[in-house]
Structure formats: C-alpha cells, structure tokens
Amino acid sequence: MAATKRRSVATIVVLVLLLAVAVAGAVYALSGNPMIATFWSLVPPLIATIMALVTKEVYSSLLIGIILGNFFYGFADGKFSFETFFNGIFFSDGGIITNLADSWNVGIMVFLVVLGIMVALMNKAGGASAFGRWAGRHIKTRVGAELATVVLGVLIFVDDYFNCLTVGSVMRPITDSHKVSRAKLAYLIDATAAPVCIIAPISSWAAAVTSYVPEESGINGFLMFLRTIPYNLYAILTILMLVVLAIARFDYGPMAKHELNAVKNGDLFTTEVRPYGDDTVAEEPKKGASLWDMVLPVIVLIVFCIIGLIYTGGFFEGAGFASSFADADASMGLVLGSAAALVFTFIYYMIRRCVDFKTFMGCFPEGFIAMVPAMLILALAWSLGGTTKYNLGSTDFVQAVLANADTLKNFLPLILFLIACGISFSTGTSWGTFGIMIPIVCGIYDMGSPMLTIAIAAAMGGAVMGDHCSPISDTTIMASAGAHSDHVNHVSTQLPYAVTVAVCCAVGYLVAAFTTSLAIILPVAIVLELVLLFIIKAVAGKKTA
C-alpha cells in the first residue's frame, strides 16, 4: 500500500510538471517563435520516459507523450489549432493510424504474431519442456545459464527483432530454472541484439548502415562498415560487460534488487506487474517429446529468415549475397521466413504426431494474445517517434546543431557519440539516427581519413546506446517481450548498465581526439570499464548465487 501511495504521489508530481511544460510551450509558441525544429521537439519523448520510469506505467506514459507532442504541433503556426492537434495524433505522418497502416510496421507485427504462434506450438508439442530437460542436464549453474544466453544471442546475429524473440523463447525456461530474474534475462537479450547486429557483417543492420552512405561520397559503404567494427566501442564493451557480470556474479542499481529477490524468494518479477501472466510454472513433460522438437524448428526459422531477407534483396535475381543483404526489406523478409518456418513446423509435428490440427489452430489466438502487450507498446512508440521526427522536426534541429561542429573535427567522434545517444533515446530508433548522422559525417571528412571511420563508428555506437536506454525503442520493447518481462522494469534496470558502458566509450572517443590508433583507443576503453566494474562491485555490487 505504501508503494502504491508513493507511486500515486509521484504520478501527480509528474503530471504537474507535464502541465508546466505544456504551458511553457504554449507561451513560447504564442510569443511568435516556432515549436518545430527546436529543442522543444525532443521534450515529448523525454517527458514520456520520465513518466514511465516514475509511474511504472508505460502505456499512459507513451500516450501522454504523443498528446504533448501534438499539443506543441498544434501551436506550430503561432496559434493553437484543434484540427492540427487531432490530425497530428491520428492522421499525420507521425500519427497512430498512419503508423498502423504502414506496411513495414504491419510486417513487424505479423512477424511478432507468427513467432508467438510458433512458441505456443513448440510448447504444445513438448519441444520446450524437452529442451529444458536437456539444458538442465548440461547447464548446471546461473553463470552457465547467463553465458549460454549470451552465446545464443551472439550466434543469432541476422536481425535484432528475430534475435530478441528467438533467444527469449529458447532461454526463458532455462533461466527460470536457475532463478535468473526476467529483468536480467531482458537485459541479456537486449544487450546481445543490437550490439551484435551492429558489428555483424551479414545482418540487416549492416545492410542499413551500408545504404546510408551517400553514393556521391565515393565511399564503399560495406567496406566502411567493416572498418568501423573494431572502433564500435559501445558494441564491444557491452558484450564484454555481459561476460564480466555473469562470471563475477554481481549486479548493481535496480537490477540487484530483482536478482536478489529471484535468488532468495524465487520471484522472477519483483514487481506486481505481470504483462504476460505468471508463466514460470513449467509444463509437464510430454511423452515422446524430443530435443529436436525445439531445436529443428528454431534452426529452420533461422535459415528461412535468412533466405527471406536475401530474397527481398534480389539474391535470386542475380544480386550478390552481400548486396542482397544491403537491399533487403527486413520486415517483408522476416514475415516470409517465419511463415515458411511455421508451415514446416506444423508438417513436422504432424508427421511426428506431436499435435493435431485442432491444437495447431488453437495456437493462433494463443500466440496472438501473447504478443498483444508488445504490439500495443510498439504502436504507441512508433507514433511518439513519428510525432517527434515528422511533426516536430527533431531531425532538422539535430542537423542544425551538427552544422556548427565542423570547427571541432578532432573531438567530433565524442560529439557525434553523445548527439547520437540523444537522438536515438528521444526517437527510439537506431536506424533513423544512422540516416541522419552518417551522411553528415561523410560530408565532413575526406574519404581516406582514419577519423572518418572512427566518427561513423561513434555515431553508430551512440545510436545503439540511446536505443538501449529508450523505452520507446522497438528493440527494447521486443527484448521485454522475448523475456516476458515488464517493459518498465527492463528499461529501469538496463539504464545504469548502458550508462556505465557509455561513459567508457566517451573516454575512448575523447582519446581518439589525440590519436587514431586502435591499439590505444580500444585498450583504454576496456581497461576503464574493467576498473569501473571492479569499483562498483566493491562499493555497491551485490553478489548473486
């Protein structure tokens, strides 16, 4: 009751602050200054983030961010227009209905549903319980469960969405059995999704980065991506941190509370919120179920999704493997691949007599319902990001800020890293941040400059960092969905870890202002992270069994 009362008071305080911001924005607009392409364009997502962290309620926080953003949008011409306000919420480029009508977004939702159906089907067939029994014989400790999650996340490098849902589905029963909290599982999933994809040459992320390098710059986009890999400090240090935390068996910040509660009390959720239900009870082993009833569908899913991606990129029309990834439509490719995998899984289970047709069809609504929380958050997050980018012109504001950074070329990697963190955090999109930053960087440096590689790597790493911290990021949302964790719990527990890595990256890119040698920049960042973690463990770290 006391916690509920404190949360209610905090909610009231946030709403009062929100009203103050809205009034200030109205006064600012009425004074003749525009709301578009100014700092005010970043205020709505910041308010939504603060509300989500304080109130622990993500749906209302996102919705209020959308309303506030379009309230500012309604003042764009110096006077308030209710027509502009309501059109902004629903029908503008950043509106809810516009985003739900977007074929790319719908494809991602269909992919979510198909994955939900496959998970339900594997559970009904007994594949999940058979895999759990096998893992129980081979993975004996919490450290082993966490490291196995990291390894699987690294191996599934094709796409971050696919990574989040697949790793979550496979590893959730194993981490549950070793009392790893759902918040920690969500962090392990999220930290091996985007950070791995951004340094994997064969991935949808590599394709996106490659496509953002302007043709007129004369730079080979794919070759540039390969050169950025060792300089992408955020990706490298995040993966290192996962290993250190697992082996050293300690956590800090809000995560420590979740982990200690899971170990001591067996409560994997800590908070009362159960968006996916209390699904920790293991299903009864099904007679005749085999390890392959889980492993084979997952392998087929991976293979078919890769085929789907390169198909959309023109591989079967003569395009090269790398170029087909560069031109792939991730949404369409994942839908085609997952749908084909679902058909294969059904036929395989029918041959194995694991399920009948009635059970198969019953998995459709079950899988859909399981993904409703993720889809609702995604829909609102897309709209808030669209409101910020399209209605309020945050992109133009950031480009104007960067236009004045040319005089600080040596310090530009650090500046780009920090700005990319801010853009990605505010808009919830790494790819959108790449699209803004990479063309600007290519226009500042000469093609042969080593600082060009470092600057692009800094922008890419900053984009992933902001994406990690942002509650409106689709990757963060899918990590919560894959772990069946409360979304706000995931964001609040991951934030201190992401900030720790970001501090080390910032120092690394500061060093880059004085030397472009990888042999100096990377070791400095790694040593700093290890020292910081050692100090945190000594001061505030709480050991888990």
Image (cartoon, rainbow, N blue to C red):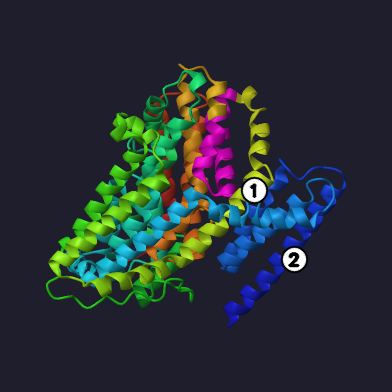
Outermost residue toward the left in this view: 288
Query: Separation of disc 2 and disc 1 at Cα?
Result: 22 Å
Residue occupying image coordinates x 16% and y 61%:
292
| Quadrant that contains the C terminus | bottom left
Q: Which residues are magenta?
A: 409-438
Q: Is residue 94 left or right of residue 199?
A: right
Estimate the x, y position of residue 119 in percent, counting from the top left.
30, 65
Q: Residue 250 magenta-drawn?
A: no
Horizontally, is 26 left or right of 247 in the view? Answer: right
Res 406 → quadrant: top right
Q: Is residue 41 visible?
A: yes
**Whole-percent x, y for residue 365 in the image:** 38, 71
Closer to the chain start, of discs 2 and 1, is 2
Q: Which residue is mark 2?
A: 16
Q: Quadrant of the N terminus?
A: bottom right
Name the residue rendered at 65%, 53% in the picture: 91
Mark 2 is on which residue type? Val
In terms of depth relative to the viewer, which is nearer, 404 or 144? 404
Q: On screen, 188 above or below 508?
A: below
Residue that mark 1 sits on: 388
Q: Is residue 194 visible?
A: no
Question: Which residue type does callout 1 highlight?
Answer: Thr
